[in-house]
Amino acid sequence: MSDDDRGEDTRVPPDRPEMAKWDPEFTAAIAKTAGAAIRRYFRSEVRGLDAIPSAGGALVVANHSGGMLTPDVLIFAPAFYKKFGYDRPVYTLAHYGVFVPPLGSLLRRAGVIEASRENAADALRSGAVVLVFPGGDYDSYRPTFAENKIDFAGRTGYVRTAIEAGVPIVPVVSIGGQETQLFLARGDSLARRLGLKKIRMEILPVSFGFPFGLSAIFPPNLPLPAKVVTRVLDPIDITAHFGEDPDVAEVDAHVRTVMQEALDELARERRFPVLG
């Protein structure tokens, strides 16, 4: 899509610099190259995209899998764009620490924005889809033997964001990412003892994989080609379900319950680790 085709972009007001850096042509190129490679490597499936509202902002809330080399965004976003096109961006919330040059500018062009309530609310009010992983690294490094558990580490900010922006929550669950290597432990108690929280490290995960064997974050092992299945669930209208003054903890518990039930269903379908 050329600049002439787009004309003046009314979707991204000039006072929203994080959103204004999204480049649909660059994003399309990433989806067709890296996204296609990831889809083939993990034999990924994305089910239920019809559940995403066709217009207006929506907060997509997902579990996070695969450790440092998580494939989640490169599985979900290309599938979304293939179905809905590039007139409606998907913004992914990420920790500010990933925006180091030159990677940071590339991530912003692909729709990754710094995780803050303000950025998320602005994007949602513009009619965009915002993808958030409330559990963050804590979730993506959950032990493989507890892979089918929804655990956001008590984080509920996503609920407040959806309430303030007046948008539905669209739960998404994924299975297979924790089979890309053997995740042994998060190491959160060890991180506390070492005082790593001072440098914003709440975990010191230990995993085993190829080619380095045992790894404590570094060196990062290459992911095994585990089959990854992602399922989009029905949107949750918070006001309709919980009234005009919803209790954040109650909404969070409901979202996690719905996601856990769907993840349990995916787990029952799975016959073999890695193979799917």
Image (cartoon, grey):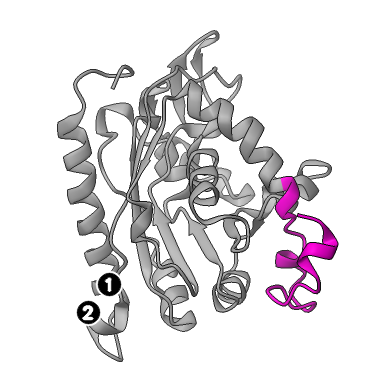
Residue linked to disc 1? 251
Q: Is residue 208 above or below residue 171?
A: above
Please report the residue visible at 40 percent of the width from the left and 31 percent of the height from the top.
177
Give x and y (percent) for residue 32.
63, 35
Q: Is residue 116 above or below residue 93?
A: below
Residues at badges 2 and 1 in contact (C-beta under 8 Å)? yes
Q: Quadrant of the N terminus?
A: bottom right
Q: SS of the residue at dot 2?
A: helix
Please report the residue visible at 51 percent of the width from the left and 35 percent of the height from the top.
70
Q: Quadrant of the C terminus?
A: top left
Return the mark for residue 241. 2
The magenta stretch is 1-26
Observer-nearest residue: 211 or 61? Answer: 61
Distance of mark 2 from mark 1, alpha carbons?
9 Å
Q: Earlier in the sequence, mark 2 or mark 1?
A: 2
> Is residue 9 highlighted in magenta?
yes
Q: Amino acid at mark 2?
A: His
Asked where in the image residue 227 lies, by quadrant, the reply is top left
- The crowding category of the residue bearing disc 2, from other C-alpha atoms within 10 Å (few below 14, some 14 to 19, many at least 20), is few
Question: Of all residues shown, which one is farthest toward the front?
Answer: 5
